[in-house]
Amino acid sequence: MLRRRTRAGHATTGFPRFYQWCGRSVADCGACTAICEAVSHRVFPLGSPANQYDQSLVNAFRRGLRQIGLVENRDIAIEITWIGGDDPEGPIAKAIQSGVDLLVPCGSSASAAAKHLTASIPIIFISVGNPVGMGLVRNLPNPGFNITGFSDGLGEISGRLIDLSAELLKPGFRAGDSVDYQWYSHWPDGKQRFSDTEGAARSAAVNLRSHDVGEKGDVQDVLATIKSMSGTTVIVQPSPFKYRLREQIIALATKFGIATIFAFPIAAREGALMAYGPDYVALYQKAPLYVHRIIHGTKPGDLPVELPTRIVLLVNLSTAKALKREMPLQVLIRADELVE
């Protein structure tokens, strides 16, 4: 909950009110909702943090606010609500009804819901992989409408995930060798990301075996199927669903002796063999720049959608040892972080 304060400590009349959702926190997971509105300078925790990593993203947003001169409990107050469900429309509708002036949804699902619910309140999204494909904006340079934000670029890195999986198959890689792909079709961008990955696999002469995980209980069955097909590596499609289940997926895949490749850097620190994706902390820390510009009169549609400036590769050496996988030297050299 954000509210500007006067020097005397009294609320400034008519200052914009903000609502921020960290839906996935990282890729839209419905993990947390930070509510920022002009009601009080106090901080009102409405729940407990989903996990330490999600909390670090909210902290990064706070740091960004301080860097542009908005000081918490002096100029603004932030109210955090953590949510775990798949439907963000309820809290967004509640925020709109309360008279907020700016919405900051985090992730594809929350951003799509915000766009659906209002055509007038300014929206700054964070962590949306394909804002054009989802119909959130007209284009990246000139988004139009009442919305702009910060894409995590996940819709553009499918080819790199395929390349990394092919590296793991060397030196015995042959055209047509198989890599498994675990995805979730029941969300706005799932099919598009699967299609992009299929195209990248064809270009790399890799046979992509897809496995659609429809429900939470399907994860173990899908991994058992991959194991029965002699699968050794699975690319986990970045999605809200997979972000929430990443620890379960990693644990089960390790049990089956299957290496996992994620697009969320945090996954490698939690036990995935590799992760290649944007620096989300930097993304969240940069987002308040647009908050500042919009509350000072810039229209969201006139601000270009920002893409991540840093993509990182992490390799978990402990997982490689547990899976008895010898990591290619080229991958180790390119890695930004080797997790022991």
Image: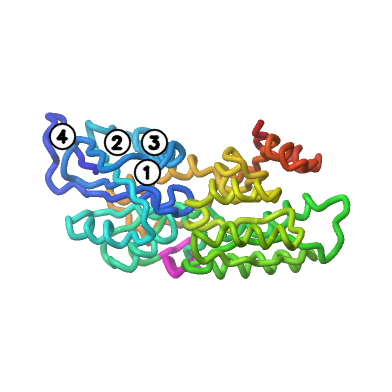
Q: Is the residue under label 2 in contact with that under label 1 (CB below 8 Å)?
A: yes
In this view, the mark in front (3 or 4): 3
Q: Which residue is mark 1?
A: 288
Q: Please tell me whether residue 27 is drawn above or below residue 201 in the rendered image.
A: above
Q: Left of 129 or right of it: where is 60? A: left
Task: Measure the alpha-carbon separation of dots 2 and 4.
Answer: 12 Å
Q: Earlier in the sequence, mark 1 or mark 3?
A: 3
Between marks 1 and 3 in the image, the one whose residue lies nearer the viewer: 3
Q: Which residue is mark 3?
A: 59
Query: Residue at 82% across / 66% down in the picture?
Result: 176
Foreground: 33 or 13? 33
The mark found on residue 6 in the picture is 4
Mark 3 vs 2: CB contact within 8 A = no
**Which region is colored magenta?**
132-143
Q: Earlier in the sequence, mark 2 or mark 4?
A: 4
Mark 1 to mark 3 CA distance (whole Å): 12 Å
Q: Earlier in the sequence, mark 3 or mark 4?
A: 4
Kind of residue at disc 3: Asn
The disc labelled 1 sits on which kind of residue? Pro
